[in-house]
Amino acid sequence: HQVEILETTERKTDTVKDNGFCPQWDDSEVFSFTVSFPDVAMLQIVVMDDDGGGLLDDTVCKAAIPVSCLRQGYRSVRLNDQYGSQHGPFGFARLLLDVSIEPCP
């Protein structure tokens, strides 16, 4: 068997200082992606703790969504801790996304 990564695209939001308990990001930031193979593509969302110039930023929580399962409109994405769990403080962790899907020209 052979596994081949065909394409990886990364986007980052700006760091928001002192934004720990109920974090909010600038809602004017829009990220666009061109997906060549939506049937096998994944959207991975990772929330990081910026250590302010440290060498290693910590993963706070994350989610992975098959692109083929995305639907247009506002979507609430369940976030998991680094072990894939939603227990404890991650029991209600969510990220609100506004998804817009346009066909490729």
Image (cartoon, rainbow, N blue to C red):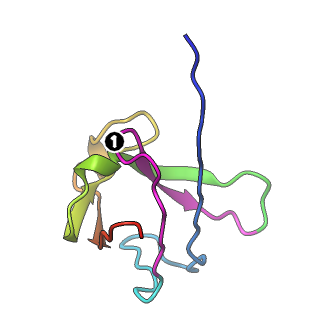
Left or right of 82: which side holds 78? left
Where's the N terminus, which quadrant?
top right
Disc 1 residue type (three-letter): Asp
Expressed as whole percent of the image width and height from the top left, the position of residue 49 reads 58, 61
Looking at the rendering, the stretch of residues picked out in magenta corresponds to: 30-52
- Asked whether 40 or 16 is in front, the reply is 40
Residue furthest to the bottom in view is 28
- Which SS type dominates the magenta stretch? loop
- Asked whether 18 or 38 is in front, the reply is 38
In the image, what residue occupies the spot 47% across and 51% down? 36
User: Is residue 36 one of those drawn in magenta?
Assistant: yes
- Asked whether 85 or 89 is in front, the reply is 85
User: Is residue 29 one of those drawn in magenta?
Assistant: no
Residue underneath mark 1: 39
Left or right of 11: which side holds 72? left
In the image, what residue occupies the spot 42% across and 46% down? 37
